[in-house]
Image (cartoon, helix red, strand yellow):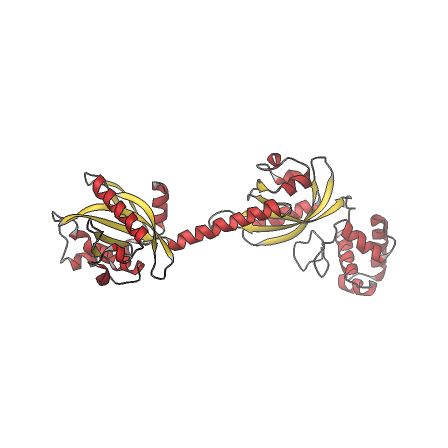
Amino acid sequence: MDEADFHTLLASFPVSWREIDRGAGPVGSGGGAFADERAARRFLAALCAERAGPSRLPDDGAYQTLPFADLSPAAVFVRDPHGRYVWANHAYAHMYGTTRDTLIGRHLSDFDEPDDAARFLALDEEVLTRGHPVRHTLVYQRSDGSPGHAAGYRFPVRWGSPCVAGIYVDITDYVHALDERRRAEEDLRALRDHSGLPCLRLSADGVVGEASAAVAEVLRVRLRDLVGHPADRHLAPTPERTALHRVWGDLVGGRRRSVRTSAVIVDGDQRRRRAWVCLSASRHAPERRPHIWAVITQLGLSDEAQPPLTATQVRILALLAAGHNNVDISKALHLSRQTIDYHLGRLRHRLDAPTRPALVARAYALGILSPHVWPPRATTATHPRSPA
């Protein structure tokens, strides 16, 4: 963990820190202990009241930090060179599931495993030998036997004699969250690489970030020619493409989490195929734009161009697929029986389908109606309850 990462980590914890050089000059400060100036003033007032008013630092600065360290939510300790606790605050004792009175005067081997105790003593010796602070992360054993993680500083102080002090923030939950995210990413990559599913991860701008070999095979392109390029160049200019652009804005804007839709894809040989796609938004942090995972769930044969249909004709096809007769359709659309018969005749001609069942079958084959939904509706419908 470098200095920038360490400062970023401390910014989210309820601690404040200040770093000074050997000449007591300020080098840096930060932390998220106080969200506003009033909270900071109340904290300083409490310190001054405990010390009976402000005063300058005494010659031995170790005792000056006691009021602050007692009130700090960060874990603070002081040990002698032999590993015996000289002082600790409540937060440090809580990390071990005990009290500060139980901790002070005891050896660290009474609370840590032998290997951990030897490692901590070696680090104490390094700090005393080198004479300057060491910033690091460590793993310790919690009171319930599970491993804990902490990040902080260890530095030399004089407590009558040379001692080692340390201030740490427990980052166990943070580390566990990182591990869970890492495992989830590994599982997702394993699914991408070994499941055979054509899937790809897109940025909010539609650029391919990563893709499975199955996608490259479907599109008949090399994987390196796919990653880093806009996915839109593999979509045919059809009404589905316009509808896809519309729902894409909802996914990126956080108004929808997932969408099932269809599109006509164009492969490297300029052949067209209809594909049914599931799009899901993955957002790592609220302030960041999401990634979009696209999984091709079904592939059709070579695509036929859709004949130009009116919105009324698409609605008639959807109602026809739902099993309605001409009387029901005329009532639903507020049209006369003669108008419905006219549109059905036009549909039979344009779809080259002589019967009502053939009309429905052709509507699904050409992608006019969306599969896997009920009641039937068009693939370009903007609302789940809208038939067209």
Image vertical order of residue 142 relative to residue 133, above or below:
below
Is residue 18 found left or right of 9 in the rendered image?
A: left
Residue 320, horizontal then vertical, whole percent? 79, 60
Q: Which residue lies furthest to the front in this view?
A: 114
Image vertical order of residue 291 relative to residue 98, above or below:
above
Between 366 and 163, the one lying in front of the other is: 163
Image vertical order of residue 326 relative to residue 264, above or below:
below
Residue 354, horizontal then vertical, whole percent? 88, 53
Between 41 and 194, the one lying in front of the other is: 194
Note whether residue 144 is visible: yes
The count of marks equals: 0
| Quarter of the figure that contains the N terminus | top left
Q: Residue furthest right?
A: 354
Q: In which quarter of the image is residue 126?
A: top left
Note whether residue 15 is visible: no
| Quarter of the figure that contains the C terminus | bottom right
Is residue 120 found left or right of 185 in the rendered image?
A: left
Residue 18, horizontal then vertical, whole percent? 26, 46
* Residue under the point 31% across and 51% down: 116
Is residue 198 found left or right of 129 in the rendered image?
A: right
Residue 175, horizontal then vertical, whole percent? 41, 51
* Residue under the point 80% across and 54% down: 361
Between 283 and 309, the one lying in front of the other is: 283
* Residue under the point 44% across and 53% down: 177
